Image (cartoon, grey):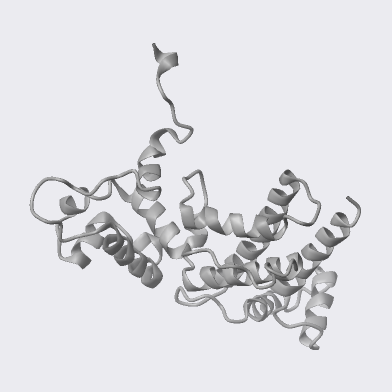
Amino acid sequence: MAGDEKSSAFGDQAGSVELLWGGRERPSRGPKPALSLERITRTAINLADTGGLGAVSMQRVAAELDFTKMSLYRYVPGKAELVALMIDTAMGEPPEPAGAAAGDWRGALRDWAQRLAAVFAQHPWLLSALVGPRVMGPNELGWTERALAALAGTGLTGGEQLDAVLVVSGHVRSIAQVSASMGVGGAPAKEPEAALSAALNELLVGRSERFPALSAALAGAARGESRDQAWEFGLERILDGLEAYAGRV
């Protein structure tokens, strides 16, 4: 009966689950494999680091490896599964946040956010690859585990801890997206706020009366009130809010 069949919450993404969580075996037929999932995945990551996610295709990866596209299908069912592997490999082993062992949840979460930002800076294509329904791999899930562990002694409920991690990671990704969008030639901007300010100032020439608040804010930034501090400013305000909230519970 249909009701007795084992179902998966991942539906047609079950192939990604097998690849990411070790359920897929190596090809058993033919000679000893000359390829490996790791080699295929690393090659795809190199292509994405250079030309973005759009530069990755099964055909292109096969050509880089000097194999046929059909050879890759013995290891990876398709591009969706390959991208899932790329994400988890690029994320890497989750680090132990500085301060976690000492119970400094705020310092640990700050360090975790900085390390996550460094991953996005190294692999900007991750920002688009992470969008949409997909299967999380063990490395990516491990990052979430480390952040939640840092919050374990705060008194926040499990749901509140998950929400806190989501807010912090969302801030990191948002600033990384701004940096990527303000970059040149696919490289993230080193000073995204400065690049954004320059673009806005050019647009506001002769239009300051129409946008007085924006003009005033840009003028203040030009006087040195702040310079590329949105990442740190936003993160500290998030941590302030969590600290104040945790003090009430």
Front residue of 233/95: it is 95
Image height of 6 relative to 205, above or below:
above
In the image, residue 85 above or below residue 135: below
For the question of whether residue 182 can be seen, the reply is yes
Q: How many marks?
A: 0
In the rendered image, the residue lying farthest to the left is 31
Residue extending farthest to the bottom is: 223
Can residue 170 be seen from the camera position used here?
A: no
**Which residue appears at 83% of the width and 65% of the height?**
240
In the image as oriented, which residue stretches furthest toward the right?
A: 248
Q: Nearer the viewer, residue 4 or 47?
A: 4
- Which quadrant is the N terminus positioned in? top left
| Location of residue 85 in the rendering, given as x and y in whole percent from the top left corner | 38, 55
User: Left or right: where does residue 44 sit relative to residue 244?
Assistant: left
In the rendered view, would you say 7 is above or below 26? above
Judge left or right: residue 162 versus residue 21.
right
Tell me residue 117's x, y (percent): 59, 70
Residue 15 spot, x, y in % from top left: 35, 41
Q: Nearer the viewer, residue 198 or 141?
A: 141
Is 63 displayed left or right of 154 in the figure? left
Q: Residue at x 33, y 68 (%)?
A: 47
Q: Is 79 left, or right, of 89 in this rendering?
A: left
Q: Residue furthest top?
A: 1
Q: Residue at x 67, y 79 (%)?
A: 202
Position of residue 31 relative to residue 176, above or below, is above
Residue 134: x and y, percent? 47, 45
